[in-house]
Image (spheres, coloured by chain):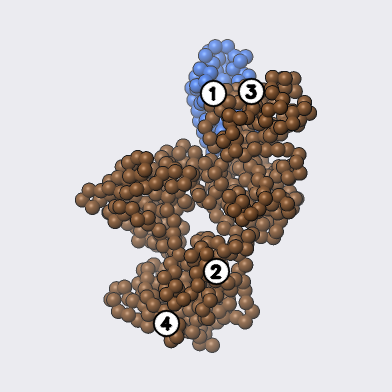
Amino acid sequence: MNEKILVIGAVASGTKAAAKIKRENPEAQITVITKDEHISYAGCGLPYYIGGVIEEQKELVVKTPEDFKLITDIDVHVKHEAVKIDTQEKKVEAKNLSTGEIKIYYYDKLVIATGASPFIPPVEGRELEGVFSVRTVNDALQIRQLVDQGKIKKAVVVGGGFIGLEVAENLHDRNIQVSLVELVNHILPPFDEEIALYAQNYMQEQGVNIYTGEKVLSMKGQDGKVQKVITDKREIDADLVIMSVGVRPNTRLAEEIGIELGVTRAIKVNEYMETNMKDIYAVGDCAENVNLITSQPAWYPMGSTANKMGRVAGINMTNEDKDGLKGVLGTTIVKLFKLNAGKTGLSERDAIKAGYELETVLVPANDKAHYYPGYREIITKLIADKKTHKVLGAQVVGEGVVDKPVDIIATAITFGARVEDLEKLDLAYAPPFSMAMASTILAANVLRNKLTGRVQGINPVELKERLKELQIVDVRDEGSFLIGTIPGAVNIPGGELTKRAGELVKNKETVLVCKIGKNAYLSYLKLKKSGFENVRILEGGINAYPYEKE
Amino acid sequence: MAEINLNCKGLQCPGPIMQVFKAAKEAQSGDIINIKVSDRGFAKDIQAWCKKTGNELLELTDTENEIKARILKK
């Protein structure tokens, strides 16, 4: 079957689809066109190239067009921008960006893999020299060159998402003074506040200035070069500005021929990656996903998802037996200096928006046995449906191993696990790898205690908002209390609580605080026994409390 | 002047600060407390503790696997 297949776009999903089609049907005539001069590159690696962690440009490029042709026998035409699709005649007009010439490509089946582009807010000064986004190899090359030349002393990163934070870290490592401005009230917008603030405090301790809840109004420069970023609250000196406020799906080509977009404004596809137009597929960042938990449309422009979409499209374009991608969880992970933060499924905010009645828990634990050298604390936030006890999502943050618990929970959610199922997982254990009760199991245990009413907890976000109304008791030792506690807390060490319960107001709403939550739970049982009715423990303890202490 | 050596590795909750606090209570002015710890939060905690209590932090070494502090009791 000498079917003619044209793929528009050649980063992750486009090249993946092309390669899969070729493996399934070696007779297929496949052509890939891209406006970029690089193909199949690791877009997610660009921040590390800027920082010099990845030394050379060629390391970023997974395959050159020549290699790709040699291995797969697929023609890749770089610097060819598709400008128009004609569904009547099944052809695509593309412009050769070197010569300006228009070339026609005929297809039997078409794959749109046009990706996403950085969204640059329409602020004054965005055209100044020294203002960049970080999306293509060329962006990274230019930034790296300026940094290597020692021309950059102060940088401002606009946007506290993954790319912005990774670039901030890498610039900081190159001895550049970095400030980051984020519009919403914390970095890592997809994460819940308490986890995001934990990471934010950590970034600040590393020396990155972070300004949240702040809007960039304009950029000012001299002789065409950027010098200052002006926000609604301050002016920040900058000889480099990185705009990383987010990306938008590239859908123009598709829209022009009446391909339907979804509610997320990305191209709507079914589980087979088919658009509403016959013989036209869409994959990667330009296409919409389905959230596996809510079954609602979602958009996760991630390399991990893009590759799966490319493969599924490739299978369906060449086989009678279809393969489907039912949905994804939006699982993500980021490294910020030595801190790792990962997320899968719904955040608390997402879950509330989706109409769930939910229960959450925040549980610090270790990634290895606490007596094994080099263990690190990790904090797990677990979110479950109150009625069915089904796990809806998790966020894990800490210097330790975070990808394992995130992947365990992602797998569990995929198979419809309940909190009770997580508790019983038989996970690999020896001291260098895990605690005997792994962090995920511990979190599930505590969540079940909450779901069954054995303990009442309060999340740090709620505690911070209600500090003044609550009777807060720090049950740690005097020395720890001295260093820092929740504002307004009194100190009664757990061991003395039963004896000294008379010092507290019995009918006042009381919150017990310890280091990680465990001793507070023991104290909770004591106070309950002493007749206190309205008691809760601070989830995650002092260690996971990201706000000001006194 | 006595030197007091504390090995608080593996200790988490109650944490090593409680041990330092106890040792400092019993120590004489001019004594040295050496402590090694695996709890990562200790590096920040011991600095804050010395500031609050007026004891002097002579040395703080933070390696991959342990944190060591040398404290002069005032």
x and y percent of residue A440 in the render? 67, 47
**Label annotation for residue A491:** 3
Please, what is the three-letter code of the amino acid marked with disc 4? Answer: Asp
Q: Could you say whether the residue bearing mark 4 is in a helix, strand or loop?
A: strand
Query: How far apart are the alpha carbons under marks 1 and 3?
Result: 16 Å
For residue A86, the mark is 4
Mark 2 belongs to which amino acid? Met
Residue A152 in view of the camera? no
- The chain ID associated with circle 3 is A
- The residue to which callout 2 is attached is A309
Label 2, label 3: how far apart the Cα atoms are: 55 Å
Q: Colour of chain A?
A: brown
Are marks 2 and 3 in one subunit? yes
Protein chain holding label 1: B
> Nearer the N terminus, badge 4 or badge 3?
4
Whether the residues at callouts 1 and 4 have beta carbons within 8 Å, the answer is: no
* Residue type marked 1: Trp
**Shade of chain B as shown in the rendered figure:** blue
- Image position of A258 with respect to A57: above or below: below
Q: Is residue A317 visible?
A: yes
Structural crowding at the residue carrying mark 2, measured as other residues with C-alpha within 10 Å and reported as few (<14), some (14–19) or many (≥20): many
Q: CA distance from mark 1 to mark 2?
A: 54 Å
Q: Position of residue A497 (x, y in %)?
A: 72, 23
Task: In the rendered view, tell whether residue A237 sits above or below residue A4.
Answer: above
